Amino acid sequence: MKEYLVIDGYNIINAWQELKVISKTDLEASRDRLVEIMLEYSAFSGVEVIIVFDAYRVKGGSEVEIKHPKVTVIYTKENQTADSYIEKVIGELGRHSLIRVATNDGAQQQIVLGRGSARLTARELEIHIQNFKGNMKKRTKNTAIKMTLADRLKDLDEEAFLKLESMRKKG
């Protein structure tokens, strides 16, 4: 079963302290940082991430979709909220996928649950991402290959090994 994480982008930016601070001086940088975090998460988790940003107040704005490996960023069209787009996505992905929606919007959470998807608050998502990063660090640390000189020598071809052995014996 394919797993999706659908994110109300501005909702998360306004809830996560790191992103909120960045957004006060550079909204684009905060969006980029959220995308960066989700790219890292999706690369290791395999979860398809869809980040939705409202553009409903942008006059004449049309929908924009930016695809990255395993992360899709959507800017909604004029007069379309992130909430309405998320509802549409849930319907399109259907009940044959595991869909989690990250938002602090209570009404949106109720709609998500009613459609058979799971919901995450912004805080729950932040904790999930932090735990995931911690687990990845532990996993990569524990599985790091520690090559000793003897380990490296095992991979030499026979001719190179014989030359080294000859040099060793000559002293």
Image (cartoon, grey):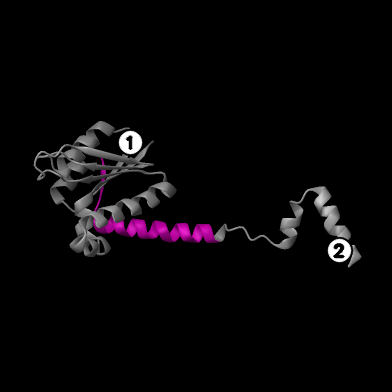
Three-letter amino acid code at disc 2? Arg
- Residue 103 in view: no
Q: Majority secondary structure of the magenta segment?
A: helix
Pick whichever of labels 1 and 2 is earlier in the sequence: 1
Three-letter amino acid code at disc 1? Ser
Magenta region: 116-141
Q: Quadrant of the N terminus?
A: top left
Mark 2 residue element: helix
Task: Kindly identify the residue that appears in the image at 46 percent across and 57 percent down.
Answer: 136
Who is closer to the viewer here, 4 or 152?
Answer: 152
Residue 125 in magenta?
A: yes
Mark 1 residue element: loop
Numbered mark located on residue 97 in the image: 1
Q: Could you tell me residue 129's position as x and y percent?
A: 35, 56
Who is closer to the viewer here, 143 or 94?
Answer: 143
Q: Could you tell me residue 8's position as x and y percent?
A: 22, 48
Neighbour class for label 2 at 10 Å: few (<14), some, many (≥20)?
few
Task: Kindly identify the residue that appears in the image at 78 percent across and 48 percent down.
Answer: 157
Task: Kindly identify the residue that appears in the image at 41 percent across and 44 percent down.
Answer: 46
Task: Kindly identify the residue that appears in the image at 86 percent across and 58 percent down.
Answer: 165
Q: Is residue 160 above or below residue 90?
A: below
Q: Could you tell me residue 130's position as x and y percent?
A: 36, 60
Residue 121 in magenta?
A: yes
Q: Quadrant of the C terminus?
A: bottom right
Q: Nearer the viewer, mark 1 or mark 2?
A: 2
Residue identified by numbered label 2: 168
Residue 89 occupies which quadrant of the picture? top left
